[in-house]
Image (cartoon, rainbow, N blue to C red):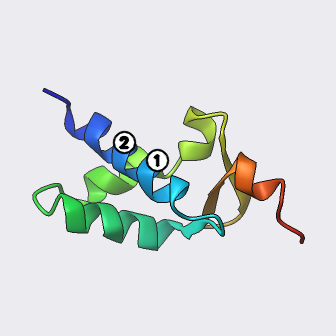
Amino acid sequence: MPTQREKIIKKAREILKRSPNGVRYSKLVNQIHEKYPKFKIKVIQWNTYDLHRKFKDVAKPERGLFILKKYLQGRIE
């Protein structure tokens, strides 16, 4: 049975895969909390704030924005 952390990270990555424009941190946390309402917000925050450090395919181009690197490469700043 997956742990809370594994469920949170899996859901975060699913959300990022569906979001070519990236996702704001607070929106990401809220979407995960909607899926797993029994998880405390702080637990979700603690497991998602550094996704860009945990996974090489996740980027944080600006404060509070997470995006997959494959989508970032096609994005014009």
Relative height, residue 71 to residue 6 (above, below): below
The residue sitting at 20% across, 32% down in the picture is 3
Q: Secondary structure at mark 2?
A: helix
Q: Which mark is residue 57?
A: none
* Towards the viewer: 34 or 50: 34
Name which residue type carries label 1. Answer: Arg
Check the image and name the residue furthest to the top: 1
Residue on which the image places disc 1: 13
Quarter placement of the C terminus:
bottom right
Residue 16 image offset from top left, x and y in percent: 52, 56
User: Secondary structure under badge 1?
Assistant: helix
Residue 72 drawn above or below residue 76: above
Which residue is nearer to you in this view: 15 or 29? 15
Structural crowding at the residue carrying mark 1, measured as other residues with C-alpha within 10 Å and reported as few (<14), some (14–19) or many (≥20): some
Contact (CB < 8 A) between labels 2 and 1? yes
Give the Cα distance between marks 2 and 1. 5 Å
Identify the residue at horizontal 49%, vertical 52% (top origin).
49
Looking at the rendered image, the quarter that the N terminus falls into is top left
Q: Residue furthest right?
A: 77
Of residues 5 and 7, the one nearer the viewer is 7
Which percent across, then down, holds residue 42? Answer: 29, 57
Please give left or right for residue 38 compared with residue 76 in the image: left
Residue highlighted by disc 2:
10
Can you give x and y, in whole percent of width and height, for residue 15 in the image? 45, 58
Residue 41 % position (x, y): 26, 62
Which image quarter: residue 63? bottom right
Q: Residue at x 17, y 55 (%)?
A: 39
